[in-house]
Amino acid sequence: MTMNDADKSTERQALRAPRGTRDVISPEVERWQAVEGAARSTFARYGFREMRTPIFEDSNVFEKGTGESSDIVQKEMYRFRDLGGHDLTLRPEGTPPVVRAYLEHNLGQSRDVARFYYIGPMFRYERPQKGRYRQFHQIGAEAFGSESAAVDAEVIDMAMTWLTDLGVGPLSLQVNSVGDHDDRPAYLRKLTAAQADLLGEMSEESRKRHEINPLRVFDSKDPRDHAVIEKLPTIIDHLSDENRAHFDEVCGYLSDWGVEHTVEPRLVRGLDYYRRTVFEITSSALGAQDALLGGGRYDGLVAEMGGEDVPGVGFAAGLERIVLALPETEAAASIDCYVVTVARDLGPHALHLMRDLRATGLRCTADFQGRSMKAQMKAANRSGAPAVAILGPDELAKGVCTVKWMESGEQREVSLDGLADDLGAALVGRQNS
Ligand code: AMP
């Protein structure tokens, strides 16, 4: 290899997307849009409005919000100093920024329940694998201001409705309660003591978690920990009467509404702020990374971040994983009509015609390279457009063009003035058939 080749190959490597990130290109991007569109319409039906927060925040937002003992803050943050020396972090999750914005803009002033959803990229320095990326996308929802179990149940129902309507592969909903300041301290003492007796059988990671946050031992994926986890006391058996009643009410609503769920006493979530209800939705359509969505109640977080004692409940779902779990569907054509010109000098007429078609809502395009008619027809075919409008000098003189329907091969002359109506009617007919 000459020096020059070596330079070129590093140059080529430097131009790849960073590890753990991916480009989303058609036809995959249309699947993303379908998931996002369904979220917007389902969430709106439950009274949620979109909130867009910055992609980076003061690092404190996550240290306080996500919690210092979480894996995210301990080892996964994209944290940097900007040129002004500010300590910033690319958001690893959506809840703390939404809480920050809720407080900054005094959105709790009216004391009404405030409901928000967000859609956007998150960043975590994790080991990439299928379904796990360093830049990934979440769709999440948060409801502030009510302790009612009805809000927990509605949020869960909204998540299930969205994923079910989308046709995501077999779903399973697990729910649990992780208690709160009433019952958790006594339970944690019991848990810590039980773990202390089992330290010899635990993985190193779980021994560390035992020190930092013993609840997180339940999260271990290490097979060595499975037997240990089976032997540990579960929080759901140690709930205060009030928390037990709250949890039973959540489950009662879900059962009433026919939302299938399983109580999973060992379900805990990887973040420090959860209190009482936690839940997770998994899909057997996925491999090892089968969690589509996770959430729970986080009463206390708003106060922790400097606000009043406002309760909250929400969830976050992984967009990439939902798309992976969607059934394969044929990509819909992205344009309705491709315009082909017989001679190069007809370009301006084609442009004019396309502007008229677009004004009526039709999607159309053409080959802008002055290529032969044969090459243009091939491009039209590749574009997937159901109709091709062919413009020739003789037709133009008569005020018509030839429309070819690609699937049937049927071809006929249509007046230029009536083309939009003609195409529109035929396309609607195709959709309905
Ligand atoms: P979390 O914010 O950790 O509770 O995760 C909520 C959801 O986001 C998970 O159920 C996944 O679907 C998704 N998710 C979390 N981390 C990643 C990641 N690194 N790559 C892709 N999706 C992720």
Image: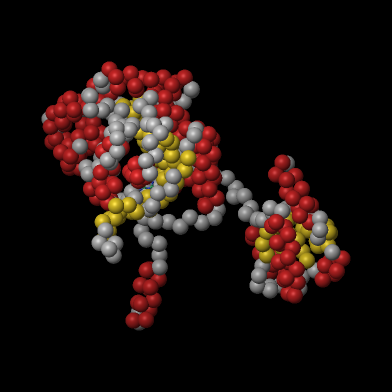
410 w.r.t. 304: above or below? below
Viewer-nearest residue: 188 or 155: 155
User: Residue placed farthest to the right in the image?
Assistant: 398
Q: Give me the residue at 83% from left, 62% from top.
A: 400
Q: Quadrant of the C terminus?
A: top right
Residue visible at 37% across and 50% down?
Answer: 122
Q: In which quadrant of this rendering is ligand 1 seen?
A: top left
Quadrant hosting residue 200: top left
**Image height check: is 273 above or below 120?**
above
Asked whether 54 or 19 is in front, the reply is: 54
The N terminus appears in which quarter of the rendering? bottom left
Residue 383 x, y percent position in the rendering? 64, 59
Left or right: 193 in relation to 325: left
> Which residue occupies the foreground of this view, 411 or 115?
115
- Applied colour scheme: secondary structure
> Could you tell me if residue 133 is visible in this image?
no
Residue 385 falls in which quadrant of the image? bottom right
Q: Is residue 267 above or below residue 40?
A: above
**In the shown orientation, is residue 372 left or right of residue 190?**
right
Asked whether, in this view, residue 391 is left or right of residue 308, the answer is right
Looking at the image, residue 258 sits to the left or right of residue 359; the answer is left
Q: Residue at x 35, y 33 (%)?
A: 312
Across and down, in percent, residue 408 comes to 76, 52
Residue positioned 14% across, 35% down in the render: 199
Residue 120 shows in this picture: yes
Relative image position of residue 417 (x, y in whole percent): 81, 58
